[in-house]
Amino acid sequence: MIQNDIHLLDLISRDKLEEILYHFTQATGVASIITEINGEPITTPQNFTSLCSKFCRSTVEGVKRCYDSDSYGGQESARQRKFVIYKCLNAGLLDSAFPIVIDDMHLANVLMGQVLEKPMEKSVAIQKATEIGVEDIDGYLNELQSVPIVDRDQLKKIAGLMAVVTRTISELALQQYLSYRRSRRYLNKLVNSVSDGIIATDGNFLITKINEAGATMFGIDKLEIVGNSLSSLFIDPTAINAFHTIVDLGEEESARFELTAVDSDLRNFPVQLALSGIKSNSETEGFVAVVRDITEEKKVEKMKEDLVGMLTHDMGNPIISIQKALQILVDQILGELNVTQMEMLRLALGTGNQLLGLVSDFLDIYRSENGQFLLRKELLSMESVLMKSIEQVQLFAMEKKIGISFVPSEELKKFNGDRTRLLRTCVNLIDNAIKYSPESSKIEICIKKVMLNEEESIPTRILKRLRQDIPYCLVTITDYGAGIPEKYQKDVFDKFFRIKNEDGILKGRKGTGLGLSYCRLVVYAHNGYIWVVSPIKGWDDKHNKGCMFNFVLPLVD
């Protein structure tokens, strides 16, 4: 017999096995049970005699002898490849054993019997009771009297029926096993065909299985890695251990991390680890981990970041030089210009400002992602920033015959902020308003000093994020264009996000999708908040719903 790699209950349910035994015992009147090959019960006892249930299995030694007896019968029947009738090693009753064997694997024993051919001598019974430590000898002898008397020929006929039942169970188990093995073989092929490492663990993160890719990734033989802790594969397993605690508390069932792994040559490499709990009856039995080596991705990401940083930095200087040259011409330092020449130069200067702003967006977002974004604060007026912003986009507004209304506030005082970046933020917002406004419409810009808890227009979710004991500067930029659907309003500040219409074509002018992401970066860096409102309450238009971008900045550090 070969070593088992599967359990009988993996193939046939306990309920089905017990149903078979129940009907067998009802028809024959003898006791029956299915046990492990070592004698431990798999099913509940069926029709056990009171002698066995009350006395033979009532002591430690009695239970041991019963298990040993059932194991002996099963081993003998498996060796002889047929059922065997024998005296049990406990009370000396007649039992019969049948092996459940599939694919040369001895899975379990089917036992029946607990009968006598003839009454047992009293002295023999007393000796057997004494050997297992029974104290109530009279009770033992009394229950012995109720054990069924069955002659051997009749017992053989009953055993023959049980042999048929056992073969039926074995054939059913075999069919299930073949199906299981085919599916398992397919699953193994599937798991071993992927390039990511797949690791299975028990409930304590001890590795039970690993696929070929995982073993290759860590440079460890599959057999050697089994039994080791999952945490031993990583430099800092804190996140894994924390996840284990979270799962125990029932708060999460899966998580994703980026960790540093270590292979058999002590080489460190970055990986992405996805962990999920495997549950049974609401309890976590183990975990499955998918490990992906992201070394090459990190290299490409670093190269991309370095390239973007280099390009944006190196492009800024020549653009600034061009801007300065254009400004000299516009200021007519080198000579007077006619109206047409001045208009063309102003257009070129405005386009140059847009290009410089775009490069600045790229560079600042790159700096932020690399922890290098720093504000250069100075005492400034937000009104002057807005007026300068309007000046920079005025030509584009004129092209679409869009009027820009700016309502200043006399209450506002100067505060500390990064002039250049706030200017770029306002230019981005006003430029967007122009892009998405219909021709001959208007844009309204307002600025005022507010206390957040006194301003009704501030959403509750924002009040929870900001201080309410200090004054803020509130800026609103309103256009009367198509507006932003509610489903997109949480995403418009994400990098590279652009709204599409129903046909999948970008609405309005094409852009990089960085402008609003940059605005959020700058406002958040100033400890403020930015949000969008659409449609505009009170605006009644069948085609246009309007859009209002708002941001608040603290007026004290």
Image: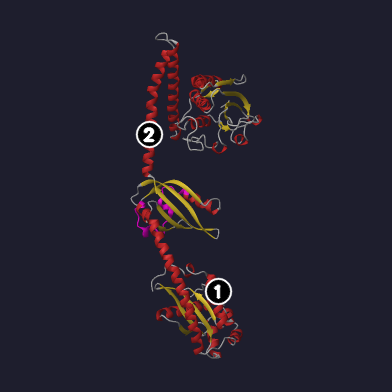
Q: CA distance from mark 1 to mark 2?
A: 70 Å
Residue at the limit of the structure toward the top, as seen here: 336
Percent x, y of residue 216: 35, 53
Percent x, y of residue 510: 46, 31
Percent x, y of residue 482: 55, 31
| Along the line of sight, the residue nearer the viewer: 523 or 502 | 502
Secondary structure at numbered mark 2: helix
Using residue 451 as the reference point, say whether residue 64 is left or right of it.
left
The C terminus lies in quadrant? top right
| First reached walking from the N terminus: tag 1 or tag 2 | 1
The N terminus lies in quadrant? bottom left
Instruction: Please provide the residue range marked out in magenta.
Output: 217-239
Q: Is residue 43 visible?
A: no
Q: Measuring 55% from the left and 58% from the top, which residue is drawn there?
A: 282
Scheme of colours in the image: secondary structure
- Residue hosting label 2: 306
Secondary structure at numbered mark 1: helix
Using residue 106 as the reference point, say whether residue 404 is left or right of it.
right
Q: Amino acid at mark 2?
A: Asp
Percent x, y of residue 312: 40, 28
Q: Amino acid at mark 1?
A: Glu
Using residue 422 as the reference point, say whether residue 323 is left or right of it.
left
Q: Is residue 429 visible?
A: yes
- Residue hosting label 1: 19
Is residue 434 in the magenta section? no
